[in-house]
Image (spheres, grey):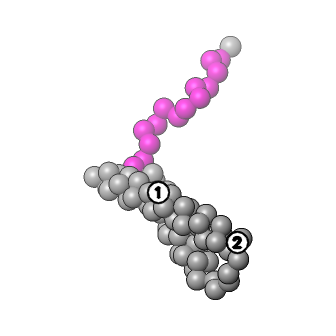
Amino acid sequence: MTSPAPPFSSAAPDPSVARDAVLAAHRDVVDATATARRSLAVAWESTAADRFRDEVTALLTDLDADLRLLEEAAAVLAR
């Protein structure tokens, strides 16, 4: 009878793999931020447009915070 496999690998994680994943996530968030900023340039006026701009502005605030966290994580993983 053999023991069940452990839920996690016993091998130490490779920091460069983690850093690559963080940098890829950062690129994705940068792309999403650029798309959101472009959407604010649409010149249409209505109550719905005002709500849309408010929601995109809130989203951009969250994305900027995410970018800072990803940048900090990449800096830590670079050490």
For the residue marked with disc 1, what is the amino acid? Answer: Asp
Q: Quadrant of residue 50?
A: bottom right
Front residue (pair 58, 10): 58
Is residue 63 visible to us here? Answer: no
Residue located beneath label 2 in the image? 47
Residue at the image point whose x is 63% and y is 83% from the top: 42
SS class of the residue under badge 1?
A: helix
**Disc 2 vs disc 1: Cβ atoms closer than 8 Å?**
no
User: The magenta stretch spans which residues?
Assistant: 2-15
Majority secondary structure in the magenta region: loop
Coordinates of residue 60 in the picture (x, y in percent): 52, 65
Coordinates of residue 78 in the picture (x, y in percent): 32, 56
Residue located beneath label 1 in the image? 66
Residue at the image point whose x is 48% and y is 61% from the top: 61
Coordinates of residue 1 in the picture (x, y in percent): 68, 13
Residue at the image point whose x is 54% and y is 66% from the top: 57
Q: Is residue 47 left or right of residue 57?
A: right
**Depicted 5 relative to depicted 41: above or below:** above
Q: Residues within 10 Å of mark 1 (few under 14, many from 20)?
A: some
Please check the rendered image and state whether residue 41 is part of the magenta-colored stretch, yes or no.
Answer: no
- Considering every residue shown, the one lying at the far bottom of the view is 43
Coordinates of residue 2 in the picture (x, y in percent): 65, 17
